[in-house]
Amino acid sequence: MKAVVINQYGSKEELVEQEVNIPNPEANQVVVKLEATSINPIDWKLREGYLKEMFDWEFPIILGWDAAGVITDIGSNVTKWKVGDRVFSRPETTRFGTYAEYTAVDEHLLAKLPDSISYEEAAAVPLAGLTAWQALFTHGHLKEGETVLIHAGAGGVGIYAIQLAKYAGAHVVTTASEKNHELLYSLGADQVINYKKENFEEILKDIDLVFDTMGGQVAENSYKVLKPNTGRLITIVGEPNHDTAQSHNVSAKGIWLQPDGDQLQRIADLMEEKKIKSIVGATFPFSRQGIYDAHALSETHHAVGKIVITF
């Protein structure tokens, strides 16, 4: 099968097309023929070598950790799934990712893809959607009636976080450049702050939950707007500043996504009910050039919604 791999860490130039063997499923795995995958910042951060301490892998490495497609083979212990099922998944983070025509996925990480959802829409969801779910609910404990600030609402994770928070009955505040305000209001945002012209920390106060996708000064300023005693910050960009959190009498936690088929199935159900939708900002074909161009766009940090690769 064709895969796009890296044989050493470095720039986009390291992406190459290579023939590799189609995976054989282990006892509790299925093999999925991919119809679409998507790009996430972890892809190019890993490509550049930023995560090599965390993932000490041999080369070649197939990047990509979003899968949408059709089951073509099942392991000996698999009973819930069959060949021909339309599925999507955030597979385990291994060196055999989804920039390939086929990928092996643990059966408990699969979700059934509703007929009304396209492969492109589905491929956009797993990593970003689960990150939003876990930040808001698993770790952020967001409740109905609370106010949440979601940074970078037009980004891959922010798009889902706004919709999930709205579905949960929260008051949703987000930050975005002006050109994306209309989109974010349509997804359920109650207040959109133009970060280029306004300082959110001068406008907001008594926020229950901040979902930080930016880090740096944005994170530092976020502690100032949280409600004392009960306010909490969840970040997906490293470890938060616990000293600053303590000085503002709030809690802070850094999280790392845990793949979860059950949570993904709940998101799939919400998509089928039209409570949540994917925003696919750009699509590229599955090829060395397509992945190269998709990484270039992702690295700008200004892509709207998700960048999807189609097979």
Image: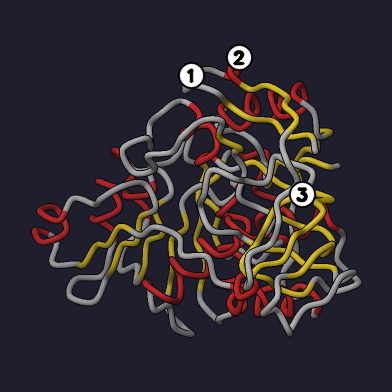
* 310 relative to 76 in the view: left or right: right
Q: Amino acid at mark 2?
A: Glu
Count residues near mark 3 (Cα–Cα under 10 Å), then give few for <14, some for 14-19, many for 20+.
Answer: many
Residue in the picture at 45% in, 60% down = 257
Q: Residue at x 16, y 58 (%)?
A: 245
SS category of the residue bearing label 3: strand
Label pair 3/2, CB-CB below 8 angstroms: no
Residue designated by label 1: 10
Q: Earlier in the sequence, mark 1 or mark 3?
A: 1
Q: Please name the residue shown 72% across and 78% down the image.
A: 270
- The image's mark for residue 102 is 3
Report whether 121 appears left or right of 77. Answer: right
- Badge 1 vs badge 2, beta-carbon distance below 8 Å: yes
Compared with 13, 9 (above or below) is: below
Total of numbered circles in the picture?
3
Question: Residue at point 51% right, 77% down?
Answer: 170
Quadrant of the image containing the N terminus = top right
SS under mark 2: helix
Real-space CA distance between mark 1 and mark 2, rounded to the nearest whole angstrom: 8 Å
Give the camera-side residue of 23 and 113: 23
Which residue type does callout 1 highlight?
Gly
Q: Which residue is mark 2?
A: 13
Local SS, label 1: loop
- x and y percent of residue 193 in the render? 50, 49
Residue 161 at what x, y percent from top left? Answer: 56, 63
Q: Position of residue 311 (x, y in %)?
A: 86, 42
Vertical relation: 208 (above or below) 66: below
Give the residue type that dot 3 points to: Tyr
Quadrant assignment, res 248: bottom left
Nearest the viewer among 85 and 260 is 85
Above or below residue 201? Residue 206 is below
